[in-house]
Amino acid sequence: MSDQLIIFDTTLRDGEQSPGASMTKDEKLRIARQLERLRVDVIEAGFAASSNGDFEAVQLVANNIKDSTVCSLSRANDRDISRAAEALKGAPRSRIHTFIATSELHMEKKLRMTRDQVFEQAKQAVRFARNLVGDVEFSPEDGYRSDVDFLCRVIEAVIAEGATTINVPDTVGYAVPELYGNFIKTLRERVPNSDKAIWSVHCHNDLGMAVANSLAGVKIGGARQIECTINGLGERAGNCSLEEVVMAVKTRRDYFGLGLNIDTQHIVAASRMVSQTTGFVVQPNKAVVGANAFAHASGIHQDGVLKARDTYEIMRAEDVGWSANKIVLGKLSGRNAFKQRLQDLGIQLQSEAEANTAFAKFKELADRKSEIFDEDILALVSDESVTHEKEQYAFVSLSQHSETGERPQATVVFTANGEEVKSVSDGNGPVDASLKAIEAHVKSGAEMVLYSVNAISGSTESQGEVTVRLQNSGRVVNGVGADPDIIVASAKAYLSALNKLHSTADRVAAQG
Ligand code: KIV
Ligand code: ZN
C-alpha cells in the first residue's frame, strides 16, 4: 500500500454547496490558483452539469490549472458525464467524479429506484466516463448508511468497469471514528478487486467528527485519499477541514507514517482567501487558521513559550503561513511593489485593465489608510469593480446624514445594467437607510438573513468587511464588500449579494 496521502480539495464544489457560499467563476479561479500553490493533488472545481455558470467555472479552472488534477462532479448519467468531460477538456490532468446514492433510504425515497437499477446505473456511468477520461472516481452517496453487502457488490462492479478511485461518503455526518475506520477496512477486505483502486474518505461534520472520521478511515481503513475543504466549508456543518487534517498527518507523522505533497506555508493565505470570498468568517479559536490558534494569553504559557517554544506549541505558526501576516505596502509603494505583492499572494489579474483598476484602487486606499495588509489587498482584488465581471449592479457613490435624535437619510448612486441610478431612503441607522435606498429601486423582495461587519486588520483604521446574506425563492447567497467606511462596505456587500442572486438563478442543486 502507498505511504502517500492524496489530498482532494472540494472547497469549490461541496464547499460551495454551503448556503450562501456560491462563488463567481473568477473567484473560483483565484481560489483554485491558491490550491495549486498549496500543492493540492486534486481540485474538485464544481459540478459542470448543474448550470452554465458552473460549467464555465470548471472550464476556466481546467484551462488554467497545470499542477493539480482538475475534477468535476457529475450524477451517474450520460448527460452529466459528457458535460463534465467537455468542461475538463483543457486540463492537463482531469478526473470525472460520478455518484449515485446506495442507501435504502436514498434509493427508495429520493431516487425511487430499486437496488438492481442503481447497480446497473452505477456500472453504466463508470463505463461511460472511462471512455472519456482515464481517471474516474465513483462515490456511493450516503455510502456509510448503505447495506454493506449491496455496497460491496456495487463497488466490485464499478472497479471492474474501470473506476480508479472509490470514495465512501459519510454524507450526513453520522459516523464515529472507530466504526467508520472499520467500515472502510471491511469494504476493502470484502471487495475482491479492492486493490485495483485507491480508497477515499469523504466525511461531513454534523457531529463535529469529520476530521477524526477521515483520519480513522486512513489509519484503520487504509484509505489513501482524503476529501476536504478549506476552513471545513460545506453543506450544513461542513466537511472535513483541509488545514486540520493536513496538519494532523504532518505533525503526527510518527503515528500516521504518511507523506503529503501539501506546501503547508500557503494554508493561512488559502483560509483567508476562502473566508473573504464567501463571507464565512473563521472563528478565532479554529485550529490552525483561527486568529488565536497560536496566541498565548496566560502568563504561564507565555513564559513557557519564551523559554522553550515546544512547551506549549506542537506546530510552528510560520509553517502554516502565519508569518506572512505583515504590513506590506503603503502610499509610497509603486506599481512594481504592488504587482510583486499580488504575485506573492498568488493573485493573477486577468488583464492589463484589471491590473490598472486594482492599482488605482490600491492608491485610493493607501491615501486613506497608512498601512495596507495582505487582507486589504485580497479584499481589493475581490471587488467587482476590479474584476470587471459583468455584473448587473455596481456601486458608484453614497452620501448619508445621521445625527443623534434624527432619522438617518441616505442617497446611493449605483449602476443597474449600465444605467446610473440615484435612490434615496431613510432608515433606522445609516446602513439600514442605504440598503433600503438600493432596495427601493431594485425591488428584489429578498429577505436579509445575515448582516455582519468584521474589521479586516484589527484597528479602527482598518477596512470594514461586510457580509450580507440574502434569501429569495429558496436560494441563499452571500455578498461581501470592503471599505474603510462601513456604510459604503455595506452597500457594496448588498449589491454583490443581489448580483449573486441573479447569477445563481439557473443552478441545479447537487445532492450530497
Ligand atoms: O457527501 C456526499 O455524499 C457527496 C458526494 C456527492 C460525494 O458530496
Ligand atoms: Zn459531500
Image: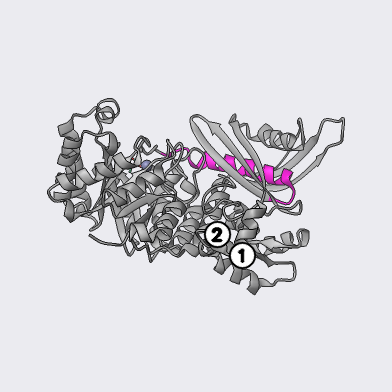
- The residue that appears at 70% across and 33% down in the rendered structure is 436
In the rendered image of this protein, does residue 340 appear above or below residue 225? below
Q: Residues within 10 Å of mark 2 (few under 14, many from 20)?
A: few
Q: Which disc, if any, is residue 199? A: none
Start and end of the magenta stretch? Answer: 483-507
Left or right placement of residue 237 versus residue 395 in this view: left
Identify the residue under disc 1. 307
Q: Position of residue 255 (x, y in %)?
A: 35, 57
Q: Residues within 10 Å of mark 1 (few under 14, many from 20)?
A: few
- The residue that appears at 20% across and 38% down in the rendered structure is 151
Label 1, secondary structure: give it.
helix
Left or right placement of residue 37 versus residue 383 in this view: left
In contact (CB < 8 Å): disc 1 and disc 2: yes
Residue that protrudes farthest toward the top in the picture: 109
- The residue that appears at 42% across and 36% down in the rendered structure is 207
Quadrant holding the N terminus: bottom left
Q: Quadrant of residue 131?
A: bottom left
Left or right placement of residue 371 versus residue 292 in this view: right
In the rendered image of this protein, does residue 147 appear above or below residue 315? above
In the rendered image of this protein, does residue 450 appear above or below residue 227? above
Quadrant holding the C terminus: top left
Residue type marked 2: Thr
Say whether residue 366 is magenta.
no
Q: Nearer the viewer, residue 122 or 398?
A: 122
Q: Nearer the viewer, residue 21 or 39?
A: 39
Identify the residue under disc 2. 311
Say whether residue 500 is magenta.
yes
